[in-house]
Image (cartoon, helix red, strand yellow):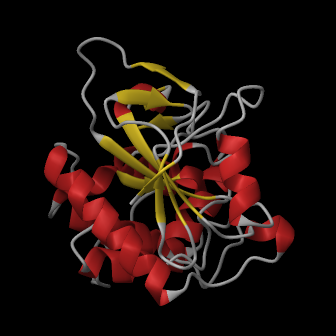
Amino acid sequence: MRSAPSPNWDARPAGEPIDTLVLHYTGMQTAEAAVARLRDPAARVSSHYVVEESGAIWQLVDETHRAFHAGVSFWRGHEALNGRSIGIEIVNPGHEWGYRAFPAVQMDAVATLCAGILRRHPIPARNVVGHSDIAPDRKQDPGELFPWAWLAAQGVGVWPEHGDFAVPDAEEALGRIGYPLPDLATAVTAFQRRWRPGLVDGVADHGTRCRMADVLHALDGPA
């Protein structure tokens, strides 16, 4: 692991647990540009780690400190998640600069890094989230190409199997999973990007609500 300290951090709120892991893509044209921005005092943004496409890992902020990666955010009743989360920026040009699949060597490094974080902090699987999960009205990352199912198979996060469960009301299901609800279509889009990436259209159709049932069953067990 390489060190590239960022000045963009402060103290975590006293008594607040570290119980959330947020995965991002950098959304910039190069890794160098992303790391430079995350270390720029004028930018006031940072993350705890950056993972390059080669698998190289940079630590920018110590895990005991609050990095500035989540911004205005919400998950499972909590707001302003920087204080209770660890943020990993995964190098990828993103939707603006030529979004592409995440290389296997990069994902191996992400999985190893996440596993270490989960050993050090009591982060439940349901709180391993993407930036678009916690800020669906602002963010798309890490996006529909991110291999959440593969990552869950490595022991990081959750990936439910398809089942035959009662089809829920979309708004109620999203709230139970943990999503903010700026409006239904925006929240559904974020859900699909994470859990049904083959169709990201913001429509809570039968298939999407069935997938919501799968997720609820995996997180909460039978209703």
Residue 43 pos. (x, y %):
75, 31
Q: Between residues 140 and 105, which one lies in front from this camera angle?
A: 105
Judge whether 28 appears above or below 107 on screen: above
Residue in view at x 23 percent, y 67 percent: 218
Q: Between residues 183 and 156, which one lies in front from this camera angle?
A: 156
The reply, left or right, for residue 157 in relation to residue 173 is left
Residue sitting farthest toward the top: 14
Q: Is residue 41 visible?
A: yes
Residue in view at x 29 percent, y 74 percent: 152
The reply, left or right, for residue 98 in relation to residue 139 is right
Residue 64 pos. (x, y %):
31, 30
Q: Between residues 60 and 167, which one lies in front from this camera angle?
A: 60
Residue 32 pos. (x, y %):
71, 60
Judge whether 18 appears above or below 87 on screen: above
Q: Quadrant of residue 61?
A: top left
Residue in view at x 48 percent, y 70 percent: 56
Residue in view at x 37 percent, y 80 percent: 108
